[in-house]
Amino acid sequence: MIPLSIPHLAGNEWTYVKECLDTGWVSTAGAYVGKFETAIADYTDSRFAISCMNGTAGLHTAMNLLGIGAGDYVLAPNLTFVATLNAIAYTKADPLLLDIDVDSWQLDLDLLESFLAERTEKRDGACHLSADGRRIGAIMPVHVLGNMCDMDRLLAVCGEHNLPIIEDSTEALGSTWKGRHAGTFGVFGTSSFNGNKIITTGGGGMIFTQDETLATRAKHLTTTAKTDPLDYFHDEVGYNYRLVNVLAAIGLAQMEQLPGLIERKKKMDAFYREQLKGVGDITFQRVTDGVDPNCWLFTFRTDRMRELLTYLNDCGVQSRPFWTPMNQLPMYAGLTYVTENHQAKKVHETAISIPSSSGLTDQQLQEVVDTINEFYNG
């Protein structure tokens, strides 16, 4: 089986993990947590980076720090991984779903702009839904597959309507908009280091913010709100969300390799686009002007997605369909959904992800392309 997206553990992972084991520093205390946070902050040029147990925990923490809770709304795209909406649900707020741009698969900014202009109002320094007066506490754009929308426009629109931005940049480590790193535009941003991401800690995440007060609060809240290094005194309801030292050690070793991993991903992306152009009815995700993407997971559209999916997996080429739109999941089926042409549904029904592991050889990439050509031409 040619794998879809598996870790590339070829650096100092063993050395750093062994040091954790040899010294006994395997839990939340230990030097590698701070080293990993510093490495991420330096790479992304984020003023602060606070590690946590996964990207979902990062999103949940960000919303808690913005005071989002029951009675609030949070805007989010209909096409995303379920963790985006799950994090909103944890706060007891209600997601408001927006459709996507059918070409870039990012949040539809035309739709967002008209929605905010026609269906919301500013009151008490916040954005409220006109229909029921409830506050919209934040918008959560998702940088799907490491691509991004026009961030200048998003910032301008949200600024006009007093709408805080929490970036779900969990797939976008290494992606930039006009040279500025994903996750550093909003009040908060997040990264994920799940096993299939561009770097991994097995499980882990990072919270970005440029605000020192919010960074201090994020670290406090994610470490069970403990106020004293000796006594077990906690001054509010906190969360056991901190990343452990042994996983941070893996993350630091992965960060040392990140530039090479991104370079390899970009070469794979270019190879697939060149080799699959004009094959069958294949169309590619359009990269937004101004974006330098990390090319994390190569995904394209075809009306024969289900047939191709079965064929590739049967041939040993691991492939996956795209996420089911949130409004098609039973727990989120009744949410308000702002759409004109149900683009998220169209992308879901036609998008397929193919092998993009950093460690794939050129021969394996050629095998993937050959198998796709066999499907369309055989």
Image (cartoon, rainbow, N blue to C red):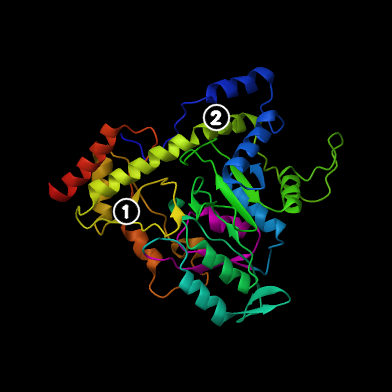
Image x and y of residue 247, in percent: 59, 32
Give whichever of 33, 74 is nearer the camera. Answer: 33
Mark toward the viewer: 2 or 1: 2
**Disc 1 residue type (three-letter):** Phe
Image x and y of residue 267, in percent: 35, 41
Q: In the rendered image, which residue does mark 1 sit on?
A: 300
At 38% from the left and 73% from the top, the residue drawn is: 341
Marks 2 and 1, Cα distance to the nearest angstrom? 31 Å
**Disc 2 residue type (three-letter):** Ala
| Residue located farthest toward the left when viewing the structure as drawn | 378
Inspect the magenta stretch and tell me whether residue 99 lies in it: yes
Stretch in magenta: 73-102
At 50% from the left and 45% from the top, the residue drawn is: 174
Q: In the rendered image, which residue does mark 2 sit on?
A: 253
Residue 194 lies, with reference to residue 290, above or below; the image says above
Give whichever of 331, 157 is nearer the camera. Answer: 157
Image x and y of residue 153, in percent: 52, 67
Q: Secondary structure at mark 1?
A: strand
| Residue located farthest toward the top when viewing the structure as drawn | 22
In-image side of 243 versus 152 (left or right): right
Q: Are dots 2 and 1 in contact, CB under 8 Å?
A: no
Residue 330 lies, with reference to residue 9, above or below; the image says below
Residue 19 lies, with reference to residue 269, above or below; the image says above
In-image side of 347 versus 63 (left or right): left
Inspect the magenta stretch and tell me whether residue 344 lies in it: no
Give whichever of 256, 6 is nearer the camera. Answer: 256
Image x and y of residue 31, in percent: 69, 29
Instruction: Characterize the local packing of mark 1: few (<14), some (14-19) or many (20 or more) Cα atoms within 10 angstroms.
Output: many
